[in-house]
Amino acid sequence: MIIPSYNRADVLGRAVASVLSQSAADVELIVVDDGSTDDTATLLASLTDPRLRVLVQENAGVCSARNVGADGSSAPFLVFLDSDDEAAPGWIDFYQQAALDNLDFASCGVRIVGDEPGEKFLTAPKHGLEFGYIEAKFLSGAFGLSRSLFDEVGRFRAGLRYSEHTDLALRLGGRMLDEPFQCRRTDEPLITIHRGDRSYDAEVRYHSAITILREDAVHLKRSPRLHATYAAIAGVAASKMGQPREARRLLVDAIRLQPLDWRNYIRWTRELLPRRQMADEVTDTKAGT
């Protein structure tokens, strides 16, 4: 069990406690401090449970931290939990049983709080061709996989700070289609995800979407819909970054891939309007001189 954390001292203790309080006897928990500058080090130093190991690295992002945690783990089956989330009773038992049964992949249901009033429950759906028809919820804590499969598909892609689970899922889907592996799922919500502020960072969205478009091109060919979605994500981000030419290029790609999705026509039109308005203003100015 691996928890990456960066400046989450206020909630990290809750995540750690949710794992160490489980009934499973054989627990290995690794927390990777990704160069935190808050009280994370003090918090972790106060935890004396022998089942907990702490690894520290310079800030390199969540994907790097997860991979470092995997390197430091002796477990044959890997599960990742975000530092602001919680594991429910039975979470470890579910994944440990999957490992004992020599399965390569397992996924559970999810409980989401904080996103809006009340609770929301998500089950593990059966995905389409793009994800190899795997029945899973690709969110941190909601799936686990064998170390051998994790290494084979290339681990988490270092540098991604958005959609890193989709990137991994696309590669897992490709592996499933080429060489099927054994999976297990349960709809029981064994993980609670706390949704708080999800501020929009255009540079992060653009970099991650472009990386997925480039690195996962062979997998995206299986789904024009998903391919168009990431072209649109990158296009909108480019627009917000003040790159209208790049935004138009990407949005045209999205339209070409999904010509019936009217939303991309609206996005593309918005990229044309500012330039037309500027041209009209220049014309009006010249006419008045």
Image (tube, grey):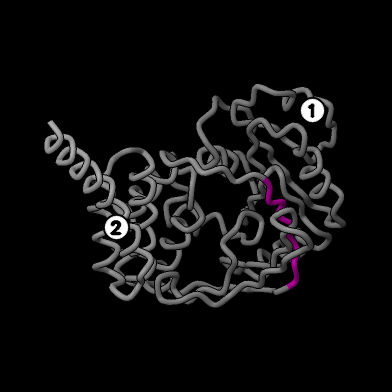
Quarter residue 153 falls in = bottom left
Q: Is residue 226 magenta?
A: no
Kind of residue indicated by mark 1: Leu
Kind of residue indicated by mark 2: Trp
The picture places residue 184, in percent across and down from the top left corner, at 63, 73
The picture places residue 190, in percent across and down from the top left corner, at 75, 63
Compared with 39, 168 (above or below) is below
Distance of label 2 from label 1 (alpha carbons): 48 Å
Pick the residue in front: 280 or 189.
280
Q: Which secondary structure lies at badge 2?
A: helix
Q: Residue at x 51, y 38 (%)?
A: 64
**How many C-alpha atoms fall within 10 Å of the one at disc 1: few (<14), some, or many (≥20)?**
few
Q: Which residue is the extreme one toward the front?
A: 288
Q: How many marks?
A: 2
The picture places residue 169, in percent across and down from the top left corner, at 47, 61
Tell me if 158 is positioned left or right of 77 in this view: left
The picture places residue 200, in percent across and down from the top left corner, at 51, 44
Where is mark 2, residue-wise? 268
Pick the residue in front: 98 or 232.
232
Name the quadrant of the C terminus: top left
Per the rendering, the mark at residue 170 is: none
Q: Residue at x 64, y 46 (%)?
A: 74
**How many C-alpha atoms fall within 10 Å of the one at disc 2: few (<14), some, or many (≥20)?**
many
Quarter residue 226 falls in = bottom left
**Sequence-wise first label, 2 or 1:** 1
- Are discs 2 and 1 less than 8 Å apart at CB? no
Compared with 81, 93 (above or below) is below
Per the rendering, the mark at residue 43 is: 1
Query: The magenta stretch spans which residues?
Result: 188-196
